[in-house]
Image (cartoon, helix red, strand yellow):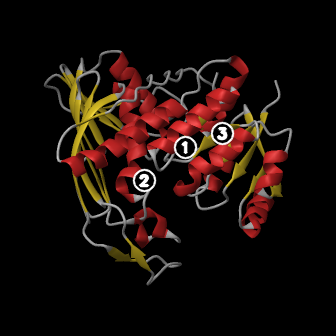
């Protein structure tokens, strides 16, 4: 069966990783790209052997069935609506939307048109995280009870060429890195039921030191440090720290502790391991990776969506999963504002696990 044709809207910093990954997969083929900056679109098109188009022209192409939305977070929902209204399936970078209302509107629009919508991150589809998923599903640590999740950095203004949006509404560590951590945890433990948190920020403005933005004053509209407690519907409780205010730390990315052991989960920003497990009172040991896709495979998610349209199965990086993660992130901010516990009203299914015997390049 021929690969589904796709387009990419947004030719910025992350787009080349999508081009590179999708070239390695058999179910989808990028044929065009677009950007409000046509010079950026033409440069990316020339590098990848695709057509450079305006956004309107890309959405008007009858042969394109899936559009990957790599625009800034503040425009994700608006561009998703444009894609869906053009009669095409949409997959966007994280977060799914800035507001709950926008996220719900996108889900409703997709349902009304019989189209699919999906969202990053897709790192949980990688071999490292799927190995952990299988271990937990197989009962290697018993029933998950508790755990920790840590992301901490001094801030993206040290390296990003255009870091200002990280500190505006829709940015901050919760909305920037929260999708990686919360999505990974939902994949492993199921949906979140309740949240409490304390957030803070170290300054109301920051100074960029990256080469291209050096000296720029960056207004800070959002909290830049969050300490949250997440209680999952399964009963597990996770302590999660997400911060742009920490210089150095020695905490592991994610650890999950069960009735019979503990497991150390790979960095959710990447696809590969290592995976460590401590069963009972035994010492930590590294576990062999059991599943494929260990490289920088950003593009697995939209390609899985494309493949799912052929078979009718659910796609793994679903809009419902992404909306639940968005709802949890807002609940973290709400809990800080209310100084209490916030129930998470949305729910989603755990994504189907990946098969361990897949050949590289295939998703079914």
Q: What residue sits 66% from the left and 28% below the top?
A: 112
Q: Nearer the viewer, mark 2 or mark 1?
A: 2
Front: mark 3 or 2:
3
In the rendered image, residue 93, in percent from the top left (x then y), is placed at 56, 47
Distance from disc 2 to disc 1, alpha carbons, whole Å, reads 21 Å
What is the distance, in whole Å, between disc 1 and disc 3 at their CAs? 24 Å
Looking at the picture, does residue 145 appear above or below residue 138?
A: below
Q: CA distance from mark 3 to mark 2?
A: 20 Å
SS at mark 2?
Answer: helix
Is residue 78 visible in the rendered image? The answer is yes
- Using residue 165 as the reference point, say whether residue 5 is left or right of it: right
Name the residue that disc number 2 marks: 176
Q: Which residue is mark 3?
A: 90
* Image quadrant assignment for residue 81: top right
Identify which residue, 56 or 161, lies in the foreground. 56
Task: Of the two numbered discs 1 and 3 on the same chain, state the one appearing first in sequence.
Answer: 3
Total of numbered circles in the picture?
A: 3
Residue at the spot 38% in from the left edge and 58% down from the top edge: 172
Q: Residue furthest bottom?
A: 215
| Residue under label 1 | 295
Q: Earlier in the sequence, mark 3 or mark 2?
A: 3
- The label nearer to you, 1 versus 3, is 3
User: Residue 361's x, y, as percent?
Assistant: 67, 32
């Amino acid at each position: 069966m021929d690969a589904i044709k796709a387009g990419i809207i947004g030719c910025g910093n992350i787009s080349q990783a999508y081009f590179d990954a999708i070239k390695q997969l058999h179910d989808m083929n990028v044929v065009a790209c677009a950007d409000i900056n046509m010079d950026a679109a033409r440069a990316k098109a020339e590098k990848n052997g695709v057509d450079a188009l305006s956004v309107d022209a890309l959405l008007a192409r009858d042969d394109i069935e899936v559009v990957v939305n790599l625009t800034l977070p503040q425009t994700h929902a608006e561009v998703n609506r444009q894609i869906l209204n053009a009669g095409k399936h949409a997959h966007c970078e994280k977060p799914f939307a800035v507001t709950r209302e926008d996220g719900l509107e996108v889900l409703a629009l997709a349902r009304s048109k019989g189209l699919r919508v999906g969202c990053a991150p897709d790192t949980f589809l990688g071999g490292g995280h799927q190995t952990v998923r299988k271990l937990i599903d197989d009962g290697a640590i018993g029933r998950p009870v508790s755990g920790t999740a840590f992301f901490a950095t001094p801030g993206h203004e040290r390296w990003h060429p255009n870091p200002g949006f990280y500190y505006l509404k829709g940015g901050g560590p919760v909305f920037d890195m929260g999708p990686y951590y919360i999505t990974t945890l939902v994949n492993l433990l199921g949906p979140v039921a309740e949240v409490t948190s304390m957030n803070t920020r170290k300054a109301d403005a920051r100074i960029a030191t990256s080469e291209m933005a050096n000296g720029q004053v960056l207004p800070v509209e959002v909290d830049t440090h969050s300490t949250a407690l997440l209680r999952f519907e399964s009963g597990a409780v996770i302590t999660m720290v997400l911060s742009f205010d920490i210089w150095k730390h020695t905490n592991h990315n994610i650890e999950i502790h069960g009735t019979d052991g503990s497991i150390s989960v790979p960095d959710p920003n990447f696809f590969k391991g290592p995976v460590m497990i401590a069963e009972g009172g035994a010492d930590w040991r590294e576990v062999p990776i059991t599943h494929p896709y260990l490289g920088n495979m950003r593009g697995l998610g939209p390609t899985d969506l494309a493949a799912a349209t052929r078979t009718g199965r659910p796609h793994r990086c679903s809009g419902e999963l992404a909306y639940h993660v968005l709802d949890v992130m807002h609940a973290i901010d709400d809990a800080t504002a209310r100084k209490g516990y916030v129930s998470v009203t949305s729910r989603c299914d755990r994504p189907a696990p990946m098969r361990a015997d897949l050949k590289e390049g295939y998703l079914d």
